Image (cartoon, helix red, strand yellow):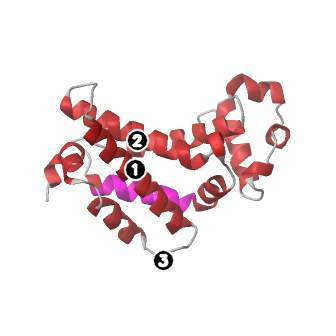
Amino acid sequence: MKRMTTKEILAGSFLELAGTKRIDKIRISDITDNCGMTPPTFYNHFKDKYDLMVWIYVRDVKPVISQIGDGDHDWTDTLHEAAQYYWKNKEFVVNALKHTSGHDSFMLSVQRINTEQMVSAVRKRLLTEHLSDEIMGLIKVYVYGTVNIMLEWLVGQNDYTIEQIVDIWDKSLPELLRQYICPDKIL
């Protein structure tokens, strides 16, 4: 049996609280009291609750989004796994998206993290650190659009199934990026 790290315990406590309370109303002391730790212990691992929230997201989705551009994984399977993650964690994701703002905005963090993964995948395919402004712009438009449509889907502004959201994400990938992200699936 694997022992949970302090970060994992704090994350579990935060997620438990986020299931019943708005994220902007959760205090550090709530998180630490809920799991029997102290605020200094929290601050030894995270700078604030928003840092913890991003850590949770990265921990949970990195195995999925790190598959982007990996020739061993099918692009639509990766999209399907991402959609399933968002749907399974809908309550937390919607809470985070609706109740964070400004520089602590969860949406901005998700966009930044997903953009970084797409950039990394394209750089790896091109064997370069520099990407053109055109490619960077396409990556940002794609990521920002998919994150926004995901938010609308999760808050119920549309009634897409997981398969429909995956199809939308897949079909909206610009052809210029498709050759780097899923070269075996060029339409």
How far across and down, in percent of the image, does residue 100 sit? Answer: 67, 49
Residue position marked by numbered label 1 in the rendering: 143
Left or right placement of residue 37 versus residue 178 in this view: right
Residue position marked by numbered label 2 in the rendering: 115
Residue lying at 19% horizontally and 32% vertically, measured from the top left: 126
Earlier-in-chain disc, 2 versus 3: 2
How far across and down, in percent of the image, does residue 7 sit? Answer: 66, 32
In the image, what residue type sits under mark 3?
Asp
Rendered-image quadrant of the C terminus? bottom left
Q: Nearer the viewer, mark 1 or mark 3?
A: 1
Under circle 3, the secondary element is loop
Earlier-in-chain disc, 1 versus 2: 2
In the image, what residue type sits under mark 1?
Val
Residue lying at 33% horizontally and 33% vertically, measured from the top left: 120
Residue position marked by numbered label 3 in the rendering: 159
Answer few, some or many: residues within 10 Å of disc 1's Cα (few below 14, many 20 plus, some between 14 and 19).
Answer: many
Corner quadrant of residue 54:
top right
Range of residues picked out in magenta: 76-89
Under circle 1, the secondary element is helix
